[in-house]
Image (spheres, rainbow, N blue to C red):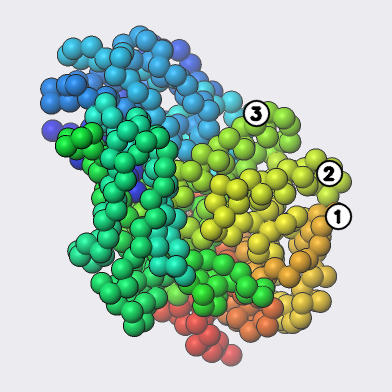
Amino acid sequence: MTKIPRPEYPRPQFVRDTWQNLNGEWQFSFDEPSFDQRITVPFVFQSKLSGICNMERHDVVWYRKAVTIPEDWEGQKVLLHFGAVDYRAKIWINGTFIGSHTGGHVSFSFDITEALQEGENTITVCAEDDLMDMTTPRGKQYWGKAKSIFYTPSTGIWQTVWLEAVAPKYIRKVDITPDLDRRTATFDYVLSDESLAFEVEVAFKGKTIACERTLAMRKEGRIIVPLDKQLLGEDNFNTVSAWSPKHPNLFDVTYRLSDGETVCDTVKSYFGLRKISVENGIVLLNNYPLYQKLLLDQGYWPDSLLTAPDDEAFVRDIELCKAMGFNGVRKHQKVEDPRFLYYADKMGLLVWSEMANAFEYTTDYIRRFTSEWMESIERDYNHPCIIAWTPLNESWGVENISSDSRQAHHATALVELTKSLDPTRLVMSNDGWEQTTPDILGIHDYQPKKEILSKRYASLESTLQYRSAGRALFATGYSYAGQPIMNTESGGIFYNVEDTSGWGYTNAENLNHFYKLYYEVISAFLESPVLQGFCYTQLTDVMQEQNGLLTYAHNPKFDVEIIKAINEGRYTPAK
């Protein structure tokens, strides 16, 4: 039997037992539905692991797969889920049009029950991706051959496709909002029907600590669950129970939906008791000052592009991040796979979640971008690892933000929209420069010399005078309002270990020279009385951009312990 790629459950925050993975071989064709080729899903045709590895431009691709619904699913609804399809997807079941979705980085699903037939069923997918449409949120995916800071595009299905069986009456979604100060967790639920009993059971380290049940007279409602101090332990409550990179404690959750005495639906989930806030201009995690040491993470792999080859790839990246002394990543121009967020939750890695940006400001762009951004927040709301949302980066898509008030209003509106959906996390506006109302003033600065960096970040006054890439830190009409300040892109030191052509922002001549350059950048940030953290560019080399701490194959280029020592201020460079 052929091994199914990416066989793991694709939605770890909302787990049911009855599901079927549809990854593996699909019929495939370019441009027209001839289905004359075979492709391995969930890898895009541009990647090696797809079995095709074709770099030609094709704006339309077709997929088809025959599936048989298990007999024991009879009497249940069948949902068809897509982890992500870039960019527009149209779906047919047995020739019946089911629906469409626009947005290349987020999940979507359809109830296909009524379109199914006995025996074999055919799923057909058409994916459209106009690479020349600059209003499409695509991030680092280039419309030509990869160059500069842009990479090979990913067209079509690039995350897991799967079927799920649910009862006719089932739980649609649950948002979890932990409250560290009150020691509670709020569960906002949405059900398929009303007049059902909804139950939430919370366990910690294998021991049930709370169970709350309500008769839901409406499809939407809320349950607030107290986290029992006696069971958790009053002493050292934060250390024992709260989630942090050092102590990634997680609470297990079981949801049950009942109709009378019959349990209709059971779902497993989890949450972290975690609080991120700003007080008096200082970022706090669980009410304690947080110094963030982040890596810029593009989330690309040489044989599979935006799709991780397997779960182990996520685990290894997180292990190496932590081993090098970092406590988080800024996911860059990519809404990452929920499996990565799951491991970040479990292993304790802070995440800044960022939307893939577009490059042209139009009404169509606003509609597309806002819709997909809202979907990404909704999908990932429950992950404790995410502490910040970053909708815009370096004025991408809002190139005239300082001269066009509409674009400035758009950036500010995204901040407020994000906070209206999630008031529990920090929100950036236009990270890097020309910002409006961010919770953190993020500055992009690739200066390599410590002497210059130390002077630049010696005081609040000198910091605010800096013009990142020649642009003011705030857009016209906006100014500093006491926010915490971080360097959110820096370094980018080129060091070539694979004898291929590439580039970085600063060149290291040899290994010792790299350590010296890295020390100069990081030590300047650590010693600054103004900065509350930094983000180094970047975790891995990506194609021609070879300024990673790891190779494109995600292997360390440097001594992990030396990088950690520099990050912790314990390193003295050789003279």
Q: Label 2 belongs to which residue?
A: 405
Q: Who is closer to the viewer here, 476 or 549?
A: 476
Q: Amino acid at mark 3?
A: Asp
Question: Crowdedness of circle 1 by 10 Å Cα count: few (<14), some, many (20+)?
Answer: few
Query: Could you tell me which residue is drawn at 81 percent across and 76 percent down?
Result: 461
Q: Nearer the viewer's eye, disc 3 or disc 2?
A: 2
Query: Could you tell me which residue is drawn at 51 percent across and 75 percent down?
Result: 287
Q: Amino acid at mark 2?
A: Ser
* Image location of residue 385, percent across then percent down: 44, 60
Q: Amino acid at mark 1?
A: Gly
Res. 99 visible in picture: yes
- The quarter in which the C terminus is drawn is bottom right
Q: Label 3 belongs to which residue?
A: 133
Q: Are marks 2 and 1 in contact (CB under 8 Å)?
A: yes
Query: Could you tell me which residue is drawn at 47 percent across and 38 percent down?
Result: 106
Q: Label 1 belongs to which residue?
A: 477
375 relative position to 197: left or right? right
Res. 546 visible in picture: no
